[in-house]
Amino acid sequence: MVSQAEGSGLRLAVVGAGHGLVATVAMSGAMGMWQAASRRTRVPPALVTDRLLAAAGIQPSSSVVRKILEIGGHLGFGAAVGAAYLTGTAALLRRVPAARRVASTVTGPAYGIAVWAVFYGGLLPALGVLPTPPKDDHGRQHQLLATHMIYGLSLGLTTRHRPARPATGTTRSGV
C-alpha cells in the first residue's frame, strides 16, 4: 500500500511498476495453467512477440533470445501498465475523494478488462498482430480476458488504497 505521504510522481510510478511486475507474474502463472489444461501450444505473449518481431523484420539469433524478448516484453508491459494504474489511481483519489469508496478489488479487475479491451480489441488488431476478439479463437479470448482480470485483481490487491497517515503539517489523503 502506498500513501501520498510516502511519495508521488516518479516514486508512485516506480512502485506501481513493481506491483505491475507482481501482477504480471500472477497472470502468467494463470496463463501457464490454462495453457496446460487446454493443451494449447502457444500463450498469447509468445504469439504477440513473434508477430511483432516479424513485422519489424527482426529475426532473433536463437530461441533463447526470442524467449527472453517474450518474457521481457510481457514483464515490461505489465510493469508499465502497473505504473499507469497506480499513478492514475493516485491522481483520481486526489481529485475525487469519493472514489475512495470503490474498492481496489473492483477497480483493479476493471482496469485489467480495460487493458485487454484497448490492446487486444484495438491496438494489436490495428497493427495486424492478432484479429479482433470476435474474429479470434474464442478460447484464446476467454483466456486473455480471464487472465487480464487476474492481473487487475492482483494489481488492485497489492496497491489497495487506504487513508494516508497525515504527514507533518498536512491532512491530505493518499493512495
Image (cartoon, rainbow, N blue to C red):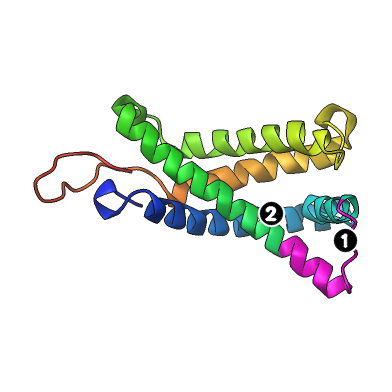
Q: Is residue 96 visible in this depiction of the protein?
A: yes
The residue depicted at 69 percent of the width and 41 percent of the height is 146
Splitting the image into 4 quarters, where does residue 43 fall? bottom right
- Return the residue at label 2: 30
Query: Which x, y percent locates residue 34?
Result: 77, 52
Q: Vertically, is 144 above or below 101?
A: below
Query: Which x, y percent locates residue 103?
Result: 41, 35
Q: Is residue 154 visible in this depiction of the protein?
A: no
- Considering the numbered disc 1 on the image, is that residue within a helix, a strand or a loop? loop
Determine if the magenta segment contains residue 67.
yes
Q: Tell me, for residue 101, which label it has, or none.
A: none
The residue depicted at 40 percent of the width and 53 percent of the height is 10
- Callout 2: 10 Å neighbours few (<14), some, many (20+)? some
The residue depicted at 57 percent of the width and 55 percent of the height is 79
Dot 1 amino acid type: Ile
Q: Vertically, is 149 above or below 10?
A: above
Tag count: 2
Dot 2 amino acid type: Ala
User: How far separated are the C-alphas under marks 1 and 2?
Assistant: 29 Å
- Return the residue at label 1: 58
Determine if the magenta segment contains residue 86.
no
- Tell whether 139 sits left or right of 76: right
In front: label 1 or label 2: 1
Q: Which residues are magenta?
A: 56-71
Give whichever of 46, 30 is nearer the camera.
46
Give whichever of 103, 75 is nearer the camera.
75
- Tell whether 157 sits left or right of 30: left
